[in-house]
Image: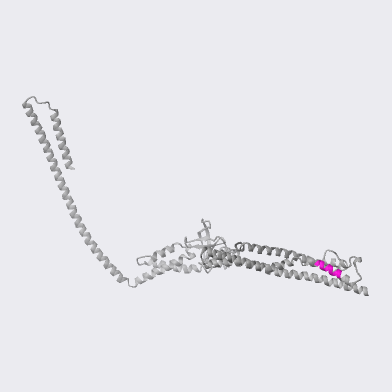
């Protein structure tokens, strides 16, 4: 920097000299020329003296900077040597302290390992526990203790014991607390939860499931049957004493699997078109059976009333029509007993079709139900094997699901065949009783007519 100033000063002096010479008027004599030269040399000497002074000042400054730099370098080297010596001493001291720590730890090292193992196992267990939804921070603590690199403190050991003891205590308790519950749509809603140990939890009469990923309780998308939800509602409303409650030994797993079971409507839909045919046949048979049952009951009542007044037959019941066919019209009464018997048999046979109506269809439905069920089962198994072939998986769950779906057709076939079998037998019994009554009364009427004629 000082050297640059010296160059600038010398340049300025030259410029001044040139300016002076340029400004001087031309010499007219030797004396004037000599005087100009003297003046020029004096100005040049002055400029040189200024440059020399600047150079000396710059030289002194540079020497001072060099001395300061050399001093700083020496101080840095001294400090570096001191730090290196201190580092070596600290390294030796750390090694000595580590050796001393290992010697004094003794059985504490083994205790530390056991503590980490217990903390890790407890974290895995409590993470799956429904109780963690109420105390979500305990899993993070146990995870941190399991991964710690230093000896646990007394406070950490006490909390480890406390968390294990709290899990055992809460297992036997029924707790009530307010917490946010995740809804099926992903939103959260605050509700009062009643928890039965780590087994089940409910809110507002609905069962909840534990979500380990979020450490929260979530509302089941589908609920168990009403007998279970009503028990949960009774437990929530109980203030004292004992009430009937639901406890899942699988800690929520069984309830989750239970609600995933398809209902009968879903099972029928999964069974393809055969199930609908079976149900249609069963419904038609049931409607016809019920209709015929009420018809036969009404006929029995009318026949019963007719038995009380055989001398006054009416056409509103089979017995009355049979009696009218025999003696209602005097012109139709034959002297020949065989002809009279044939007429009575004709009247009875005329009433049989209406009395045994729909029984043939019911017998057909009883025989066709299991066969249709077998067809549905075969179709379901074909679909199952086709699905397994397309997916390339031999998962037992997939096979079990397909087999269960296929068996629904067999259940439906037997389900309509067995009731219709009993219904058909019952209707056949009633109709035979009425036909037998008609035969008895007509035979008795014929015998009475023959006795009167021979008497």
When asked about the image quadrant of residue 161, the answer is bottom left
Residue depicted at 65% across the width and 66% down the height: 372
When asked about the image quadrant of residue 116, the answer is bottom left
Can residue 405 be seen here? The reply is: no
Q: Nearer the viewer, residue 240 or 257?
A: 257
| Magenta-drawn segment | 342-351
Q: Residue 357 magenta-drawn?
A: no
Depicted 22 relative to depicted 89: above or below: above
Q: Is residue 364 left or right of residue 148?
A: right
- Split into 4 quadrants, where in the image is the C terminus? bottom right
In x, y percent, where is residue 337?
89, 72
In x, y percent, where is residue 389?
53, 64
In the picture as drawn, the residue positioned furthest to the left comes out as: 31
Q: Is residue 37 left or right of residue 86?
A: left
Which of the colour schemes (rainbow, by chain, secondary structure, one colour) is used?
A: one colour
Q: Is residue 310 left or right of residue 367?
A: right
- Split into 4 quadrants, where in the image is the N terminus? top left
Can residue 284 be seen here? The reply is: yes
In x, y percent, where is residue 107?
34, 73
In x, y percent, where is residue 354?
78, 65
Which secondary structure is most common in the magenta stretch? helix
Residue depicted at 93% across the width and 75% down the height: 454
């Amino acid at each position: 920097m000082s050297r640059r100033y010296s160059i600038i000063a010398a340049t300025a002096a030259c410029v001044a000299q040139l300016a002076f010479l340029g400004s001087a008027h031309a010499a007219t004599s030797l004396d004037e020329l000599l005087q100009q030269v003297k003046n020029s040399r004096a100005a040049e000497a002055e400029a040189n003296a200024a440059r020399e002074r600047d150079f000396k000042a710059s030289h002194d400054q540079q020497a001072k900077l060099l001395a300061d730099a050399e001093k700083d370098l020496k101080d840095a080297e001294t400090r570096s040597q001191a730090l290196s010596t201190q580092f070596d001493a600290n390294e030796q001291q750390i090694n000595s302290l580590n050796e001393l720590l290992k010697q004094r730890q003794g059985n504490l090292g083994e205790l530390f390992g056991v503590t980490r193992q217990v903390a890790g196992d407890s974290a895995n267990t409590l993470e799956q526990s429904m109780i963690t939804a109420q105390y979500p921070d305990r899993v993070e603590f146990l995870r941190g203790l399991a991964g710690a690199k230093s000896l646990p403190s007394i406070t950490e050991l006490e909390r480890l014991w406390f968390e294990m003891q709290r899990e055992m205590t809460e297992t036997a308790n029924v707790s009530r607390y307010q917490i946010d519950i995740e809804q099926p749509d992903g939103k959260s809603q605050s509700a009062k939860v009643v928890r039965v140990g780590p087994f089940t939890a409910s809110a507002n009469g609905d069962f909840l499931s534990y979500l380990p990923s979020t450490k929260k309780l979530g509302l089941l998308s589908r609920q168990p049957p009403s007998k279970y939800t009503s028990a949960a509602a009774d437990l929530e409303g109980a203030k004292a004493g004992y009430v009937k409650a639901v406890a899942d030994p699988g800690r929520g797993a069984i309830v989750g699997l239970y609600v995933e079971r398809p209902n009968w409507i879903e099972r029928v839909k999964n069974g393809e078109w055969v199930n609908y045919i079976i149900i249609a046949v069963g419904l038609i048979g049931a409607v016809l059976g019920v209709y015929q049952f009420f018809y036969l009951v009404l006929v029995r009542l009318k026949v019963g009333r007719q038995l009380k007044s055989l001398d006054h037959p009416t056409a509103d019941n089979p017995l009355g029509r049979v009696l009218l066919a025999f003696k209602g019209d005097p012109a139709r009464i034959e002297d020949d007993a065989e002809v009279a018997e044939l007429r009575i048999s004709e009247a009875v046979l005329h009433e049989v079709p209406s009395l045994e109506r729909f029984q043939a269809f019911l017998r057909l439905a009883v025989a066709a139900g299991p066969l249709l069920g077998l067809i549905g089962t075969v179709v379901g198994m074909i679909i199952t094997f086709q699905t397994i072939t397309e997916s390339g998986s031999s998962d037992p769950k997939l096979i079990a699901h397909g087999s269960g779906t296929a068996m629904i057709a067999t259940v439906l076939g037997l389900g309509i065949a067995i009731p219709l079998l009993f219904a058909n037998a019952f209707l056949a019994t009633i109709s035979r009783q009425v036909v037998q009554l008609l035969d008895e009364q007509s035979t008795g009427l014929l015998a009475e007519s023959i006795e009167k004629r021979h008497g």
